[in-house]
Amino acid sequence: MANSLKAFNLPFNSLADVEKFEQTPIEQWVPYHSVYDAFCATVEKFVDKPALITLPPGDPMGEGIPITYRELLAKANQTANLFLSAGLKKGETVTYLLPLCPQAYFTMLGAEAVGTVNAVNPLLEPEHIHGIAEAANATILIATGQALSPELWEKAAYVIERMPNLKAVYVLGGDKECDGKKIFPLDAETTKQDASAINGPLNDSLDDVIGYYHTGGTTGVPKLAPHTNRMQLSQIASSGFGLGYSEKDCLLAGLPMFHISGSIVVGLVPMLNGITLVIVSPQGFRDPLVIGNYWRLVDKYNVTVLGGVPTMMSALLNVPVGDADISTLRAGLTGGSAAPIEVLKAISEKSGVPMLEGYGMTEVTCFTTMQPQQGEVRFGSVGLRFPFVEVKAADID
């Protein structure tokens, strides 16, 4: 491709740095009309670099399985073609109930390219999952099979029974659940598809809705928030700048994909900056084995950014660094809810890097403010606004 993503890891010390970043229009920072096109350009630059490394379940220090950027694009293309072959059209949605695994990334990239993706928290009650899938206009469901999780399959079956208009259901680890008529094994059907290109209409407009993410209910009743190509591309630039992301970084991916922290902050944004993501476990950072080996994983994979929610940071305070070399860490980030100042101070001291907070909303794709990575650290502060973001303090009463 003629265009390419710019490097976003510029100095971020003050509001003046934000304003300097804004002197270049966002369209020049990310010169694409779709997330898929931007990802293809990233793949051209980092062809054989690992995009994902999946650690073996139950053995986080075991040998990880890498997926290169080239291979990830091939899987995204196959997944998109799978959805097209099932009759997915623009304006229709792929809802998925998956643990943290490579197939979740394939689904996100493939669905966003040709339809709309809708990641749902599999821990929700079945009736809530059904309500979200209905509201999102889901016509394809990606489920987790009985062999992997009887509980998750029961929830999927509840949805399938109540949504007769589903065009297809694809099951991760699917076997006896699959009838060959509407319900199929996900991996087997995906590998049948063309990996070289997407053979159908793409979401090629900046204003195409490519994602529906349900809010967590922190500030009100949970609802679906639409994401467009424009929104996610803008976040790639602004979060890339705010976090100082570059291809030299490596992150542990342990946040759930149904939340924007997992799908955007530790998903699309780093991937489109050429970063390697290490998928720690199907349970993510909820896996006690991962938390217990966290500092050793930082050492093994030369992790550069320490990131997670406040409860995870609190748990890490109880894990000794031991003889792990964590000198590759350059920054720390937490969000999702307000972190106690004492936790921020303690984890900063333990890790050797300042633990900074970012604030945002699902409705605006992700972050809107963050403490500057190289600037003054003020624990408990919302920090500075991101480029191209307007922030206003208002009394709504």
Image (cartoon, grey):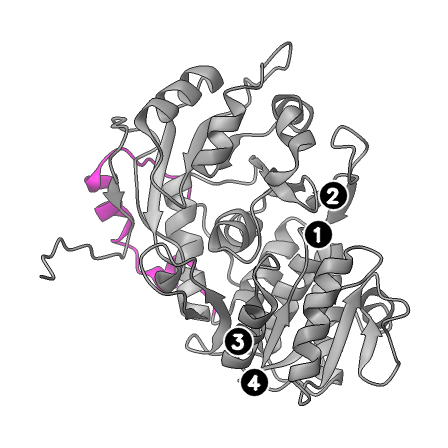
Q: Position of residue 165 (x, y in %)?
A: 66, 90
Cα–Cα span, label 2 and label 4: 31 Å
Report which residue position mark 4 lands on: 90
Q: Is 344 a magenta residue?
A: no
Q: Circle 1 sits on which residue?
A: 101
Task: Tell me the magenta residue range.
Answer: 8-32
Label whose residue precedes the other's in the sequence (3 or 4): 4
Q: Nearer the viewer, residue 7 or 226?
A: 226
The residue tagged 3 is 131
Q: Residues within 10 Å of mark 3 (few under 14, many from 20)?
A: few
2 and 4 marks in contact (CB < 8 Å): no
Q: Is residue 253 visible?
A: no
Q: In the rendering, which numbered label is found on residue 54?
A: 2
Q: Is residue 30 magenta?
A: yes
**Which one is in front in this view, the residue at disc 1 or the one at disc 4?**
1
Label 1: how many Cα within 10 Å (few below 14, some 14–19, many 20+) = many
> In the image, what residue type sits under mark 4?
Lys
Q: CA distance from mark 3 to mark 4?
A: 21 Å
Picture coordinates of residue 117, whole percent (x, y): 57, 70
Q: Quadrant of the C terminus?
A: bottom left
Q: Does label 1 or label 4 sit earlier along the sequence?
A: 4
Q: Secondary structure at mark 1?
A: loop
Between 7 and 85, which is closer to the camera in this rendering?
A: 85
Q: Is residue 67 left or right of residue 391?
A: right
Report if the CB atoms under discs 1 and 2 are less than 8 Å apart: yes
Residue 347 in picture, x, y percent from top left: 43, 22
Observer-nearest of 198 and 111: 111
